[in-house]
Image (spheres, rainbow, N blue to C red):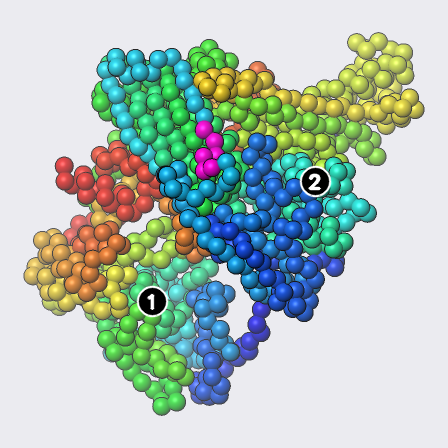
Amino acid sequence: MAKREYLKPTTLHEAVEILAAAPGRRIVAGGTDLMVYIREGKEAPAALVDVTAIPELNGVQKLGDGALAVGAAMTHSMIGSDPDIRAVAPVLSDASSSVGAVQIRNLATIGGNVVNGAVAADTLSALAVLDAAFLTFGPEGEKRYTIEEFFLAPGKTAVGVGEVLTKILIPAQPGASHAFIKVARRRAAAISRLAVSVIANPDGGYARIAVGAVLPKPGRITPAEEALKEGFDLAAAKAAGEAAKAHVLSISGERPSMVYKLPVVSSAVEKAVIKALSLREVK
Amino acid sequence: MSSLEKVVGVDGDRRDTLSKVTGRERFSGDYKVPGALALAIARSTEAHALIKNIDSSKAQALPWVVRVFTARDVPGENSYGIIPITKDQPMLAEGKVRFKGEAVALVAAETLEAAREAAALIRVDYEPLKASFTPEEALADGADKIHEKGNLCFEHDSLMGDPDKAFAEAAVVVEDTYTTSSIEHSYMEPESGFAVMEDDIVAVTVSTQNPHYDHADLCRLLGLENDKVRVKQATTGGGFGGKLDLSVHSYVALATLLTGRPSRLTYTREESFAASAKRHSFTMKYRTAADAEGNLLAVDAELIADTGAYASYGVAVAMRAAVHAAGPYMVPNSRVYSRAVYTNHVFSGAMRGFGVPQVALAHESQMEKIAAKLGIDPIELRLKNALKPGDKTITGQVLGDSVGIRECLEKIKAVRDGWGAAADDPDCFRGIGVGAMLYGIGNTGVSNPSTAQIRVNEAGGVTLYTGCADIGQGSDHALLAICAETLGLSREDIALVRADTKLTTNAGATSASRQTYISGNAVKDASEKFMAKAIEETAKITGKDIADLCFTGTGVKGAEREVTLTEIAESLKEQGNELIGEGYFDPETVPLDHHTGQGKPYSTYGFAAQLTRVHVDKATAEVKVEKLFAVHDIGKAIYPQGVIGQISGGSAMGVGLALMEEFDHASDKNFDTYLIPTVLDVPDVEASFIEHAEPTGPYGAKGVGEPALIPTAPAIVNAISDAVGVRITSLPANLERVHRALQLMGGK
C-alpha cells in the first residue's frame, strides 16, 4: 500500500498554508467517504490534511439573532445530540441522526457531507429548508455562500482547491415546525432513496420544502411551498406533494429509478407536511 | 461430577463464549505463522472466454515475488467439487474461464503488497465466448457451451399418482410463477487459512464446514496420498453453506507443497463476494389443485435454478427442492421437474436450506391462494392438509412418529388469535402472514454417516473425538451434552478434540441440519460402547459379574473399590487392546428412483411454522416486520438456548431473503451496495419449539439450523399480501415491488 503523509494543522492559517504547500493534498475529517475512495483506487491524494483539530471548525456558536454557526468538523453524533441545534434546527438534528449507523455518525462530519455534495447526502435537504449559508476560509480569506451559490452540480461545490469549509450558518426559525423523512432499503447504514425536509410556519405564512436523492443539487421546491401556503391543510399538503413531483420530473426526467421515486416524492412530501403541521398523528 | 445431573436439555455456558466475546478466540487469520508466504490470486476479468496466453513475466520479475503458479503447476487432477458426479471446478482455470472472478493464477511473495501487485501485473489473453447469465439463455439454441457436457447441469423428475386426472377433477386450481434472488452468505469471517509442512505432510488450518471433504479433494488436487495431507478446522466465523466448497485451502496447500514454505491467504470481502458460492436463484412454475373442501389433490411444479459456472452443490439443491416442493402437506398426486443450469455467474452452492427456502415461497403462496379462493382461513387450510405420522410424502415415503407440523400450526393459530386483528392506520396497512415447512435432516437419498470416538486421556478422564466442524452454531456444546448425558458426566468433565483429519474421523459436513442428529447419534453410540467396554474389562479384572458393575464416569464400581478408567485402559493395553468407544451412525435412506423420484430421501424431518405481522407504509412502501413468532418441531432440544439462537438468527436471515437481499452479479462488490438486515430491520423474534421425539434421534433430537430460516420469507410475503391485497411473487419484496403492489391495489 502506498504510504502518504498525514498532517494535522491546529489553526486555519496553518491548514491553508499546508494545503498550498504541495499539490495533491486533500482535506480529511471523518474520512468515511475519502478512505473508501482511496481503498477503491478512486482517489490517491499525496497527503491527508486532517482539519478536525482546528478550533473554528468545532462547536456550535449562538449568534446574536438566534442563529447558529455550526462547526464543519462536528460529527453527526454531536449534531444529533446538541441541544442548541435541536432547539433551533431540529430538522437538521433528525437528518444527521439518520446518517449511516452509529459508527459512521461518530466519525463522519457535517462538513464532509456538505463538501462532497452527493445527491443522496442526508443533511442537504435539511440545510436547504433551513436556508443555511456556508463560510469558507482560503488563501483569499473568508467567503460566504448561499446554498444556491454553494452547490454547483452532483459532487461539485464552490469550495476551491486550498479552501476549507469552516462553518454552516443556520438562521433562527421562530415558530416553525418541521419534519424529516428518509426512505432507504433498510433502517440503518443505507443510502437514502429519497429524503424530504419540511419547515412550516402557518402563522408566519411560510413553508419550505426540499427533497434529497432525486435532484442533482439541493434546493427548495418553490412550487410545492406555494401550494402548501394555499391553506396549510390536508388538501394543501396533497397539492404540495403533487407540485414537488412535477418539479422533480421537470428537472430529473423519467429514468428507471423514477418509476418508484416519482410517485413516492408526492406521497412522502405530503406525509412530511402532514407530520410537520401535525394535521394528524403520523407514526 | 454429579452422576444424577441431567445435561441434555439444560443450557450451560458454551466453551467458546468468553473467548469470543472478549476477542481472544483465534480464527485462521489470527495465527502467527512464522516465515509464511503471502498469496494473492489473479482473477478472470471475463465471464466466459478461452485463455490464449498467460504472461506472468512482469509479476515474476517483481522484487519479493517467490513464484507464480498456473493450472500447469497443479500436480494432481485440477478438478474438484463436493458431489462426486460433478467434480467440474478447477482450482486454477485451465484453457477457459467460466465466470468473472475465477482464479487464473496464484502469486506467492514475501509480502502481501508484493503478492497483490504481482497478481495485478499478470496479463491474460482471452478469446471471449458468448456468456449466458440466465438459465434460459444458457439453454437456448446457439448458447456457447460452458462445460463439455452442455449447459444442463442436472435434472430430476418426480411423479406420484395421476396429477393430470387430479387437476381435471379439481374444484380449485391455482397457478403462478415465483422467482427468488441470488444471495451472498455474508458470514462475518471471510475465507481464510494457512498451510505449513509438518515433515512431509501438508497441514492446512482453515475456516471450513467440512474438513474431511476438504482433505479428500486436496489429496486429489495435489496428487498426494491420504496420509500426506492434514486439514484442521480453525475456529470458524460463520458458514451458512458457503464454507462447504474449497476456497483458500487449495491455494495455501499448493504454494506450501511446491515451495516447502508456510503460506497464508485470507480473501478480501470483494474476493469473497466474487469467488464464493451464492444461493441459487430459482424460477418456479406452480399449479396446485384442491377439492371444494380444501383438501390438496395435486401439485405440478417446474423448478429451474441458476447454478452458475460450476456445479458445487447444484445437484443437491435441485434434488432437495424437488423433494420439498409440496411443503409439509399431504398431496396424493404430484409431478415435479427440477433443473440446475450452468450460467456464467459465479457458482451457486449450498446456502442454509438448499433450495427449500425457495420452494417454500411457492408452496406457501399457493396455499394462500387456495385459501382465498375457497374462503377458508389460511391456517385452517394448512391444518386440514398437514402431514401426520403414517402419511406419505411426495416421494412415497411413509412418515414415522416425529411429525409435529399440526402442533406448530395450532400454536401459531392461538398466537394469531391473541394478536387480534391488525389495525390499519392512516399511514400504513397491516397484515398477518403464515409460513410453514418441512425439512429433511441429512443428505438427500444417500448414505451420509458420522463417526466418533471416546478415549481415556492422560488425566484419566475421557476425550471425545469428533470430525464435526462447529462453525459457530454450537455443535461442540450439543455433542458434549450427548456424550456427558450418556456417560453420566457433566460437559466440563469431557475433553474435546474436534475436526482435525489427523486426529478425528469423518463426521460428514456441517450442513443439511445433520450434525445434532447424525453426529449426535455417533457420539451416543461411541459413549455407550465405551461404557460397555469399560464394564466388560472390569468384569475380567475383578472377576465380578457384568450385571453387578456400573459405570461411574471416572471408572467402574461394583467391586470392593472403583476401578479407574486408567487402570482399565492399562489392562486392555497390556493385551494389545484399547479402551475406546467407536461410534457410527448412518441415517436410513432409500435413494430416489431416477424416473419417478420415489424413495426415502431422509430418515426424519424437522417441521415449523412462523407467523409475522408487518406494516407497509402507504407513502413510501417501506415494510417493517413488527412481530415474528416461530415454532419449530425439533424432536428434542439438546441445548435449548442454541435452538432459540438458531431460530432467531435464521429468522433474521429470512427477513433479508424476504425484503432486501439480491446479489447483483454485475455490481455488488461488497457490503457497500449488498444490503443485509441490520438489527433495526429485524423484529424481536419470539422463538419457541416443540419436542415430538424422533425415535431414531439422540435423545429424540432432529435438527434446526436450516429450518430456522425457511418459513420466514413466506410468512412475510403472505403478511404483505394480507396488508395490501396484492401478492408479490418475486423476492426480494423490495421498495419497488411493494410500491407496485400498492399501486395495483389503488387501481382496484
Q: Position of residue B417 (x, y in %)?
A: 31, 26
Front residue of this view, candidates B506 and B428 = B506
Residue type at mark 1: give it. Answer: Ala
Q: Nearer the viewer, mark 1 or mark 2?
A: 2
Q: Measuring 45% from the left and 53% from the top, which residue is drawn there?
A: B128
Magenta residue span: B150-155
Work out whether disc 1 and disc 2 sit on a shared chain: no
Residue farthest along the left direction in this orientation:
A230
Q: Is residue B152 magenta?
A: yes
Residue farthest along the right direction in this orientation:
B574
Q: Measuring 17% from the left and 60% from the top, which residue is drawn there?
A: A249
Residue type at mark 2: give it. Answer: Cys
Q: Quadrant of residue B741?
A: top left
Q: How many other residues sit within 10 Å of disc 2, few (<14), some (14-19) or many (≥20)?
A: many
Question: Label 2 is found on which chain of the structure?
Answer: B
In the rendered image, which residue does mark 2 sit on? B219
Q: Is residue B148 above or below residue A265?
A: above
Q: Is residue A279 above or below residue B417?
A: below
Q: Position of residue B404 (x, y in %)?
A: 45, 19
Q: Position of residue A151 (x, y in %)?
A: 28, 74
The tag on residue A118 is: 1
Q: Measuring 80% from the left and 18% from the top, which residue is drawn there?
A: B533
